[in-house]
């Protein structure tokens, strides 16, 4: 196994562990965009807007939804498993897409023409 392959596989392993296990203990506090969009409103402990004027008042649920909406896999039995499955699938899809693009770009690259002897 080449050194590069081992490095990539180690990185993939670390990403899978972080997405599958550590993501369940991540902060439940809103991220920067959520915090900024609710500035000026009163928000309950459940995250519901109860008063005030802010950008988030006009927010609606996304029409499409999907099996991974809100960072959780819909078909899982528990919230912990839903988050873990969602994270692992996200890492695998991202790795596959990035690896495929890298392979395409690398395969199309042509070698530089050889320099004739005596020319620098």
Image: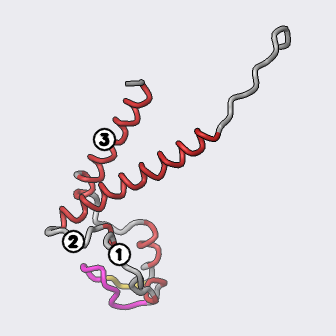
According to the image, label 3 marks what residue?
13
Image: 116 above or below 9: above
Residue that label 2 marks: 75
Which residue, given by chain and number where applicable, does mark 1 sit on?
Answer: 66
Query: Magenta part of the protein: which range?
Result: 44-52
Residue that appears at 27% across and 56% down: 23
Q: Note whether 13 is above or below 118 in the view shown.
A: below
Circle 1 crowding by C-alpha within 10 Å: few under 14, some 14–19, many from 20? few
Q: Quadrant of residue 120?
A: top right
Q: How many marks?
A: 3
Tell me the number on the disc at residue 93.
none
- Percent x, y of residue 106: 58, 39
19 part of magenta stretch: no
Q: Tell me if 34 is positioned left or right of 27 in this view.
A: right
Q: Which one is nearer the viewer's eye here, 1 or 70?
A: 1
Q: Farthest right residue?
A: 119
Q: Secondary structure at mark 3?
A: helix
Residue 50 painted magenta = yes
Q: Position of residue 62 (x, y in %)?
A: 41, 82
Sequence-wise first label, 1 or 2: 1
* Crowding at mark 2 (Cα within 10 Å: few <14, some 14-19, many 20+): few
- Check the image and tell me how it is coloured: secondary structure
110 sits to left or right of 55: right
């Amino acid at each position: 196994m080449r050194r590069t392959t081992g490095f990539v596989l180690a990185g993939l392993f670390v990403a899978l562990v972080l997405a599958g296990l550590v993501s369940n203990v991540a902060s439940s506090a809103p991220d920067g965009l959520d915090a900024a969009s609710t500035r000026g409103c009163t928000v309950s402990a459940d995250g519901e807007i109860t008063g005030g004027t802010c950008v988030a008042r006009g927010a609606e649920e996304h029409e499409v939804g999907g099996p991974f909406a809100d960072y959780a896999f819909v078909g899982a039995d528990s919230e912990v498993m839903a988050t873990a499955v969602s994270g692992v699938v996200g890492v695998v899809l991202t790795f596959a897409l990035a690896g495929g693009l890298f392979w395409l770009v690398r395969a199309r690259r042509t070698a530089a023409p050889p320099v004739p002897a005596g020319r620098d």
